Image (spheres, grey):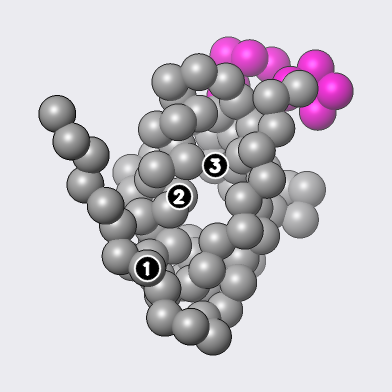
Amino acid sequence: MSMSVCAVPPPGAPVIRLTLAGTGEPLLRMEKRLSCAAAGAGVQLELEIRKDLPVLGIPHAQTPVVLHDGKRIFSGLPRTEAIEAWMKNPV
């Protein structure tokens, strides 16, 4: 089984910096969704992956969690389309 590859954003595309916190398969799935959403939104993604959940104060049951400027923007595994919509208009 092969995974699909997402498009690459154009050079000079805006950059969004996010932190992804979690572990295991859900973390990998969310990382893929974030990458695909960024490509679809035409932005470059700078992703910091954190697995030290207790240090972040995030209960394992709420992971994966995506943070933007220290604020939680996604919990669990939202649809790629929802992530892409947010990336087009991050608030």
Q: Amino acid at mark 3?
A: Phe
Q: Is residue 15 left or right of residue 77?
A: right
Question: Residue placed at 70% from the left, 32% from the top?
Answer: 50
Helix, strand or loop for disc 2: helix
Above or below residue 28? Residue 37 is: below
Crowding at mark 1 (Cα within 10 Å: few <14, some 14-19, many 20+): some
Q: Nearer the viewer, residue 18 or 70?
A: 18
N-term-proximal mark, 2 vs 3: 2
Corner quadrant of residue 52: top right
Viewer-nearest of labels 1 and 3?
Answer: 1
Question: In what quadrant of the picture does the N terminus appear?
Answer: top left
Dot 1 or dot 2, earlier in sequence? 1
Which region shows up in magenta?
53-63
Q: Amino acid at mark 1?
A: Val
Task: Spot the residue most to the bottom.
Answer: 12
Rendering coords of residue 29 (x, y %): 40, 33
Task: Give percent across and percent down for residue 74.
Answer: 54, 42
Circle 1 is placed at which residue position? Answer: 8
Residue highlighted by disc 3: 74
Residue 45 lies in quadrant: bottom right
Which is more foreground, mark 1 or mark 2? 1
Magenta stretch: dominant SS?
Answer: helix
Q: Tags 2 and 3 in contact by the CB under 8 Å rule?
A: no
| Distance from Cα at disc 1 to Cα at disc 2 | 12 Å
> Looking at the rendering, which quadrant does residue 51 occupy?
top right
Label 3: element kind = strand
Residue that carries the numbered disc 2 in the rendered image = 34
